[in-house]
Amino acid sequence: MSYSAEIPRKDSTEDRDFVSRFLSGNTQVELPQDHQSLLPKEINDKLAPTGGKMALPFGVFNLITTVMGAGLLSLPYAFSIGGLVPASIALILILIISLFSGHLLIDTLSLLPQSLKVFNFEDLSVFSYGIIAKVLSLLTIIVLLYPSHIAYMILTRDQLELITEFSFNHLNATNSTAHYWITQKYTLMSLAYIPLLPICFLPKIRFLGYTSFFGFSCLLIVSISFIVFSVIGLVHDADATVINFSCANFTSPGSICVPLFPSSIFKFLESLTIIALVFVCHFNILPICHELYRSTKLRRKLTVTSTLSIVFCVYILVGIFTTLQFGSNVQSDVMKSYDADSIVLLVERCLLFLALLPHYPILLFPFRASVIYLIGLICDLVVHLKLVVKDDLSLTVRESRFVWFFVTLCSFILAFAPACFVPNVDIVWGFVGSFGSVLVVFIWPALFYLKVRRDYWRKTTDAKCNLGIKGALSIAMIIIGIVIMFMCTTNHILVIAGVED
C-alpha cells in the first residue's frame, strides 16, 4: 500500500468561479461559450477521450504495486484467527466492495464537468463538499499512513531480526555481548532506518519509484514460495501429519489444527480488520486514471477490475495454503512461522527487507505533504480570523524549508519510537484496517458519488436525479462501513486493553 504524490491542479479562474457557484447552490449558472468543457466527462469521453501516455497494462501494474504490500505477510494470520471459511468469505466480500467503491470513484469522475481538473482524493472532496471535506480527507490520509509507517518499520525490523539470528547461530555467537546489543529492537531499527533518514529530507523522491518493480517482484516470489512450500509440506508429510479441522480441546501432537471457524466473534473482527486493508488502493485510482492513455470510463474500470482480480487470486491462494500448512500456529508476520535455519528462506527474508525498506520514504512523502497542507489551512483560518495580519502566511509556511525539515523529523521520530517497542504488527494493522481503510473503501467513495451525482449531473443536464441502484447501494455501503468501523475499532481497543484475548 502506497500513495501517489499530489499533482497540482491547473484550473483557471473561470473554472474556480464556476465551481464556487455550483458549491453555493446557485442553479442559475450560464454556460460559457465553450460549454462543451462543462459537459460531464461521461459525455465528453465518447466525443474525445483524454488522458496521459500510460498504457493499460502499465496502469494495471502500477496499481498492483500499490495494493500488494506488507499486508500480504499478515493475511495468513487473519485466516488463522478468523477461520478458513469466514475469512475466505470476508475476503471475497471485501473484494466486491472494493471493486464497487473503485467503480464509484470512476463514475463520480465521469459525472464531473470536463473543465474540472480532478487528480486525487482531495480534489474530489473539495469539489463535492467544500474545504471542510478537504480537511477531513487530509486527516484520513494522515490516519491511514501514520500507522502504515509503523507497520512497515515493524515488518522490516522482523526480517532483519531473523537475518541477524541466522547469522549469529551459524557463527556460534548467540551468547556474546555483540549478539545481545545487536538483536535489541531499537538497535535493529537504527541499523535499518538511520541510514535511510537523509533520503527522507529530499524534496522529491521519484527515483524510489524504480524500486516498486523490485518490491513487487520480491512479494510475488514470496507469494509463490508460500504456495509451493505449503504444497510440498502437505504432500511430503501426508503420512506423518494429519490436518484436524476440529480444534476444540485440541491436544494431538501429530496433527495440525486448521480452524474452519473462529473461536469467537472477537477473533473474527480482529481478522476482519486485517482483511479490510489488503485491497486499499483507492487513493491511487484517480492519479492513475489521469495518466492512463485514452482514459475512457471503460478503460479506467478495466484497470481497477483487472488489478483487484489479480491481487485477489494471489491473496486467496496464500491465505488458504499457509493456513493448511501451519494451522492455528501462524504468526502475525508469516515469515516467523517458517524455519529460521533455511538458506532459501534467508534469501527471501533479505529480499523482503530490501523491498520493504524503501516503502517508508514513499509513504512519508504524501504523509508529510498532507500535514504541511493541513498546517497551511490552519494558517489561512488564523488569517481569516484576523489573529495574524499576513495574507501570504499559508504560502510562506508551505514553502518554508524549516517547516519541511521539522515535519519530516517529527514524522520519523513519531513512527520510529513506537516501532521499537510494539511487539507485533497486528496491533498496528488493527487501527489501519478498522478505521482508515473503512473510510477510504466504504465511506468516502459513496459520499462522493451521492453528492456529485445530485449536484453536478442534475445542474448540467437538467435531468431528474433519482436514487437508482447505485445510489441505494452507496447508502447501504456507508451504513455497513460505519457499523464495521465501530465494531472493529471497539474490539481492537478491547484486545489491546487485554479485555478480550
Image (cartoon, rainbow, N blue to C red):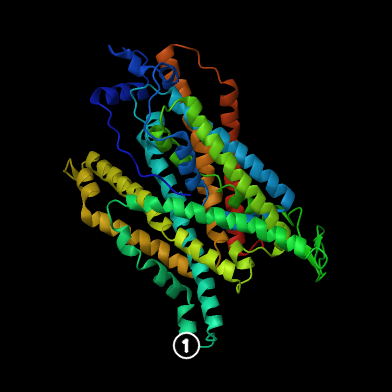
The reply to whether residue 80 is visible in this rendering is: no
Residue on which the image places disc 1: 177
Q: Nearer the viewer, residue 70 or 416?
A: 70
Q: How many marks?
A: 1
Answer left or right for 6 relative to 352.
Answer: left
Q: Position of residue 268 (x, y in %)?
A: 68, 52
Q: Position of residue 355 (x, y in %)?
A: 46, 58
The reply to whether residue 412 is visible in this rendering is: yes
Q: Residue at x 77, y 65 (%)?
A: 237
Answer left or right for 448 relative to 382.
Answer: right
Q: Residue at x 40, y 18 (%)?
A: 44
Q: Nearer the viewer, residue 18 or 105?
A: 105
Position above or below: 24 against 240? above
User: Would you call the spot at circle 1 few (<14 residues within 10 Å), some (14-19), or many (20 or more)?
Assistant: few
Residue placed furthest toward the bottom: 176
Position above or below: 309 against 146? above
Q: Position of residue 466 (x, y in %)?
A: 54, 17
Answer left or right for 183 relative to 44.
Answer: right
Q: Residue at x 36, y 44 (%)?
A: 5
Answer left or right for 260 relative to 270.
Answer: right
The quarter of the picture where the C terminus appears is: bottom right
Q: Secondary structure at mark 1?
A: helix
Q: Residue at x 61, y 62 (%)?
A: 334
Position above or below: 384 against 167? above
Amino acid beneath label 1: Thr
